Amino acid sequence: MDGVGTYTQKVARYAASCNYDDLPQQAVDIARQLVLDTIGAIILGSRPGYASVRILGDMAIEEAANGRSTVFGRDAKGSFQGALLANGTMGYAADAEGGGASRMHAAAVFVPTVLTVGEHLNSSGRDVVAALALAYDVGCRISDAADPGPEIAYPHSFHPSAVFGHFGAAAAAGHLFQLNEEQFVNALGLAGINATGMINWVSDPTEDSRPFVIGVAAQSGTRASMLAKKGMGGPILILDDAKFSIYDAYSMEMHLDRLLDGLGQHHRILDADGFKRYPCCGDIHSGLDGVLSLMSMHGLKASDIESITHRVKPGRVEIIDDNSLKSHNSQYILSVAAVTGKIDPDDILIDRRSDPAVSDLYSRALLLPEPALDEITDGAPAIVEIQTRKGDLLSKRVDYSKGRVQNPLSASELEEKFMRWSMTRMSEDQAREIVEVTGRLEQLEDVGELTRLLAI
């Protein structure tokens, strides 16, 4: 193609040439874990209490009376495009999925995409694994190229998970649709000009729009690759130093070297930053670990606590400080955990401040910036302080919450978490069948063997 930008072309060329045999075994192992963990989050997010998921699932089914695509968590099939939107939204609905990378809830976008597209095309497990790895490679590199640094979490009010998730979804779908280099150039361009997802969902107390932008990324990114496959053109300088580039739109930062650094040698799925133990914003997890640890170590009950102070990186304060979204409200999450000893999925669906004990402690919980924590560049560290009614001041610093790669969950702990969350909607036997099939994901002749188990 004449005039294609150097960086856009090199990324497209790589996307068109990569295949399963290029992946190290570690990448395949991580892909299996990501799929199982995200399916658990999807099942959790498919519960009727998540209104956006219910509405989008209804729409997908209504759109196609004889649809062939599984709407996860439903016993009726729907349209392909409708299922992409609904299933992608489920990926982030419960805020329970792991596999984050490069500022993105990457697995929330990419896993529903590869499962839904894979089912549509009767793709093999090998192809689905390769598509997932490619989604990480492309989405993470493009996000990194526009990363302004930790001081500015969300430049221009856009959500990286949704914006750069479009590109990763396009790459994943493009692999499964077998796009060539020229078609990948167009798919990335079409994904880029439609990429969006404002962080303004922080003002939606229903939390319906928070996961919706993730579903849009899965649907729109896939559609970009479908259109490119059919011959539709797109911008050919989407990843280059050009006027009106993605860098102008989303950050005013441009680090083109990050697009190609290690491309083809280092697979970015290896950088997935672990898994969640709690269904809430990851910026709160270290604080949760600290509070629950202090209470256990000192035998405290909520009634023993005078106040809780949660200190985090300055750049993260605005995301979790007394937010109207319960999933992103540090004071709320820590108060619930102090009273109940845990965080349950329903805690972001039901306002636990109706409990006087939670409400009382919530009024005495504080979130503060701590510049010293910026020294931890690869995590979401926290310092928590508990002032007891007896006058003791207890403090604990947690640099890496349990579940992150620096403090990982074991394989048995991951499976236990999956079973606990999936059994909110299905029997133990059904859940164990998903574990068994996912455990041999790369051996499946048709990934439909797995997706059929997600029709509940």
Image (cartoon, rainbow, N blue to C red):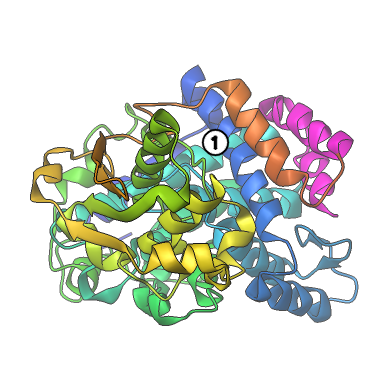
Magenta-drawn stretch contains 437: yes
Q: Is residue 296 above or below residue 132?
A: above
What residue is rendered at 71% in x and 66% in y?
Answer: 83
User: Residue under circle 1?
Assistant: 130
Magenta-highlighted stretch: main secondary structure? helix
For the question of whether residue 55 can be seen, the reply is yes
Magenta-drawn stretch contains 36: no
Could you tell me which secondary element the residue under label 1 belongs to? helix
Quadrant showing the C terminus = bottom right
Which residues fall within the magenta stretch?
Answer: 428-456
What residue is rendered at 90% in x and 71% in y?
Answer: 66
Counting from the top left corner in percent of width and height, residue 108 is at 53, 53
Quadrant showing the N terminus = bottom left
For the question of whether residue 3 can be seen, the reply is no
Q: In this view, does 258 lie to the left or right of 348?
A: left
Q: In this view, does 329 lie to the left or right of 253?
A: right
Which residue is more in the foreground, 15 or 318? 318
Which residue is more in the foreground, 352 or 30? 352
Counting from the top left corner in percent of width and height, residue 345 is at 62, 55
